[in-house]
Amino acid sequence: MSERARPAVNLNEIDPRVFPATAERCTGCHQLKLNGIPAIKLTDRFGTPLYVLDEDVARSRAREARKALQSEFARIGSDATVYYAGKAFLSTAVVRWMADEGLNVDVASGGELAVALAAGLAPERIGFHGNNKSEAEIAEAVAAGVGTIVIDSEQEIARVAAAAAEAGRIQRVRLRVNSGVHASTHDFLATAHEDQKFGLPLERAVELVGRIAESDALEFVGLHCHIGSQIFATDGFRESARRLLGVYPALGELLGRPVPELNLGGGFGIAYTPAQAADAPEIRAVARELADIVAETCAEAGIAVPKLAFEPGRSIIGPAGVTLYTVGTTKAVALSGTESVEEQLDGVFDERLYVSVDGGMSDNLRPALYGADYHVRIANRESDAPPALARVVGKHCESGDIVVQRDLLPGDVAPGDLLAVAATGAYCWSMSSNYNYVPRPPVVAISDGQARLIVRGETIEELVAKSVLEGEPDAEPVALGRAKRD
Ligand code: LLP
């Protein structure tokens, strides 16, 4: 790359808009420090790949979201309950952090429910989601005494009513509706346009709430809508609130009482790269805009403002996470032909440096699944080498096994270097797999100079032990059909 084309970027800088706010480059040692701990001390102790969650950042983001939403809705004479969406990342430790910070927890399966309960969370602080909860999951949730179950199909009205009657309880329920709002995000992440599996049409809300109200075992608390995930613009949330509140007068008439609550789901986007930093919404501004539209719509409709509920996941835990990897190999690949010379990140590059790390799509599926991009920096040292257009790739047998599509790294990045990928707290560990029999990495929480294991990593021995050979007790043949030889 020519001098003229060299981007004016300091590759040693740790960008606080993408890395956790407590991350910094240590002035004396030149290494990345995460919440006061040199990254190499973490990896010396726990190995790589390693998921690191900054507990202080996660807690302060949770607290900030709750305070922002509660104070903005208090301003319009209402209140807000914040559920942490556990699908983003759930472990017993994280449930406790969220509970301490005054958040409830939203779970989307029997497994997530079990984690929340194992952490000792009061069941009334749990909201239970899912478009196809099994009858066993519903029965467990009702028996545990979960605060609310979000009904997501016609069949579920009867199923939840039956489970509640059986348990001798009155179950509080929400109805998930589809507001028809198309959130501007990746197609797979948008959930409230018409042609997808979640929710029921808003036009049917009155009829369906009528059916819920017929059951003595169910108490309807409000409508729920989640328009999608990783959303930057607030107009979709505002429009969704407006549409849902549009049916509240009719619902109030039907029930003979005001609908107490409105749940607008989660979906607030975060910056994964410095280029996105200016666009990522700030929770206080979102809260203010939403409170304004809710107040205005309720005033127009002549109804009291219901209590609001929200379910942010990514915006709380995503920026608290960093994944540490060790570089194994590097490979410079020519971008041949003038049309394929990449002109990006403010530079002109005629080759791409493939940097292979010891993890990949098994610990972060998002680039392969959504084309998501991430930001990476060298963690074990500084470098003044000229920048290279880098692609960080994993060790899996698939060319789409990419961790960072494109970023600049010092051109002398080499085997043995430690890389830190920012903003991996949400939907990375929770969507991890054992592809190629790669064990899932551990998760370590850091706070005030201390590191603590919060999720054990897997071992190859554990994965091998899942295979069952003839002669082992679990492999005992079971006669389930007619034998051919008879
Ligand atoms: N509430 C409901 C009903 C949801 O379905 C979701 C996310 C959330 C809350 C939390 O949304 P958040 O605030 O985290 O955006 N795997 C994808 C994201 C899928 C989100 C699914 N539902 C990703 O990696 O981007």
Image (cartoon, grey):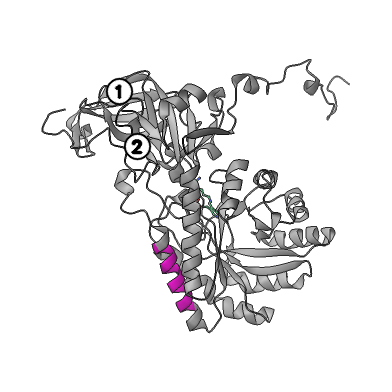
Q: Residue at x 45, y 29 (%)?
A: 360
Q: In 3D space, how far apart are the residues under numbered discs 1 and 2 (Cα atoms)?
A: 19 Å
Quarter of the image with the C terminus is top right
In front: label 1 or label 2: 2
Q: Position of residue 258 (x, y in %)?
A: 63, 78
Query: On the image, numbered disc 2 is attached to which residue?
Result: 24
- Magenta-colored stretch includes residue 283: no
| On screen, residue 147 above or below 315 | below
Q: Position of residue 97 (x, y in %)?
A: 57, 47
Q: Does ligand 1 reach within 8 Å of label 2's beta carbon?
A: no
User: Is tag 1's residue or tag 2's residue first in the polypeptide sequence?
Assistant: 2
Q: Is residue 396 visible?
A: no
Does the residue at mark 1 contact the one at mark 2 (Cβ under 8 Å)? no
Q: Residue furthest right?
A: 486
Question: Where residue 413 is drawn, which disc sits there?
Answer: 1
- Magenta-colored stretch includes residue 293: yes
Identified by mark 1, the residue type is: Val
| Mark 2 neighbour class, 10 Å CA radius: few under 14, some 14 to 19, many 20 or more | many
Q: Position of residue 257 (x, y in %)?
A: 66, 80
Between 29 and 212, the one lying in front of the other is: 29
Q: Residue at x 44, y 33 (%)?
A: 323
Identified by mark 2, the residue type is: Glu
| On screen, residue 277 above or below 307 | above
- Left or right: residue 267 compared with residue 458: left
**Residue range of the region highlighted in magenta in the rendering:** 285-297
Image quarter for residue 3? top left
| On screen, residue 457 above or below 81 | above
Image quarter for residue 290? bottom left
Quarter of the image with the N terminus is top left
Label 2: which secondary element: strand
